[in-house]
């Protein structure tokens, strides 16, 4: 009797939070976000006045750190919004991925 209850628990599989295909898509979008965040921060540095640049650099230390921080922020925002978008698309019945 005890073995059956253990087997029943093992047979019930939970659906994963994200499928492998969804994780790959989120990873690719994250890489795109990381690259675009770096490019965006470089272009913003070129548009800043010297006073703005000095104020920001006094807080962070160097332009490289600013670029890395901006890229990582965009990366995490991309990951979060990708997960939310995939979950919402499932709820409304939009099929983004072929099964």
Image: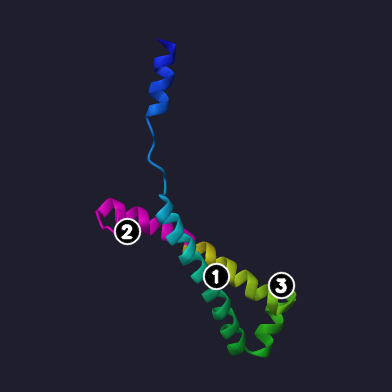
Marks 1 and 2, the one that precedes in the sequence: 1
Q: Residues within 10 Å of mark 2 (few under 14, many from 20)?
A: few
Which of the two labelled residues, at mark 3 and mark 1, occupies the earlier sequence position? 1
Discs 3/1, front:
1
Residue 89 pos. (x, y %): 30, 56
Q: Is residue 1 above or below residue 27?
A: above
Residue 97 is inside the magenta segment: yes
Q: Nearer the viewer, residue 60 or 77?
A: 77
Quote the CA–CA distance across marks 3 and 2. 41 Å
Residues in magenta, as a range: 79-99
Residue holding disc 3: 60
Quarter placement of the N terminus: top left
Q: What is the C-alpha distance between the residues marked 3 and 1?
A: 19 Å
Q: Earlier in the sequence, mark 3 or mark 2?
A: 3
Residue depth check, mark 1 versus mark 2: number of the one nearer the observer: 2
Label 3 SS: helix
Tell me the number on the disc at residue 97.
Answer: 2
Based on the displayed image, in which of its 4 quarters is residue 73 positioned? bottom right
Q: Is residue 24 magenta?
A: no
Q: Residues within 10 Å of mark 1 (few under 14, many from 20)?
A: many
Using the numbered discs, state the Cα–Cα distance from disc 1 to disc 2 in whole angstroms.
Answer: 23 Å
- The label nearer to you, 3 versus 2, is 2
Report if the CB atoms under discs 3 and 2 are less than 8 Å apart.
Answer: no
> Residue 76, how many percent across, how many down?
53, 62
Mark 3 residue crowding within 10 angstroms, few (<14) / some (14–19) / many (20+): few
Residue 93 appears in which quarter of the rendering?
A: bottom left
The residue shown at (31%, 60%) is 96
Q: Residue 12 vs residue 36: left or right?
A: left
| Residue 77 numbered mark, or none | none
Q: Residue 34, which numbered label?
A: 1
């Amino acid at each position: 009797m005890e073995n059956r209850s253990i087997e029943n628990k093992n047979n019930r599989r939970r659906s994963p939070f994200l499928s492998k295909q969804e994780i790959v898509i989120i990873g690719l979008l994250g890489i795109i976000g990381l690259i675009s965040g770096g490019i965006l921060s470089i272009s913003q540095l070129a548009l800043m006045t010297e006073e703005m640049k000095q104020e920001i650099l006094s807080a962070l230390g160097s332009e490289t750190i600013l670029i890395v921080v901006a890229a990582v922020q965009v990366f995490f925002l991309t990951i979060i919004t990708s997960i939310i978008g995939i979950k919402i698309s499932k709820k409304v019945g939009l099929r983004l991925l072929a099964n």
